[in-house]
């Protein structure tokens, strides 16, 4: 039972960690796209 709980805790930690990493990548992508759009608008 303790082993199963430990495995569950590890899976939960990994899920939260990977979700945070994906959010960071997504936010970076959105931020970059926004900067690029502003740069393009300034050139036009």
Image (cartoon, helix red, strand yellow):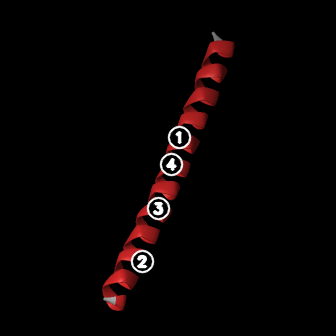
Horizontal side of 11 relative to 42 (left or right) equals: left
Residue at mark 3 to residue at mark 1: CA–CA distance: 20 Å
Horizontal side of 23 relative to 38 (left or right) equals: left
The residue depicted at 42 percent of the width and 76 percent of the height is 9
Residue ID for mark 3: 16
x and y, in percent, of residue 35 in the image: 64, 29
Dot 3 falls on a residue whose secondary structure is: helix
Q: Which badge, 4 or 2, comes first in the chain's sequence? A: 2
Name which quarter of the figure residue 7 lies in: bottom left
Residue at mark 2 to residue at mark 3: CA–CA distance: 10 Å
Residue at mark 4 to residue at mark 1: CA–CA distance: 10 Å
x and y, in percent, of residue 24 in the image: 55, 50
Residue ID for mark 4: 23
Residue ID for mark 1: 29
Dot 2 falls on a residue whose secondary structure is: helix
Residue at mark 1 to residue at mark 2: CA–CA distance: 28 Å
Q: Which badge, 3 or 4, comes first in the chain's sequence? A: 3
Dot 1 falls on a residue whose secondary structure is: helix
**Which residue occupies the foreground of this view, 11 or 33?**
11
Residue ID for mark 2: 10
């Amino acid at each position: 039972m303790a082993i199963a709980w430990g495995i569950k805790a590890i899976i939960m930690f990994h899920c939260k960690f990977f979700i945070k990493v994906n959010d960071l990548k997504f936010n970076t992508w959105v931020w970059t796209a926004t900067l690029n759009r502003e740069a393009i608008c300034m050139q036009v």
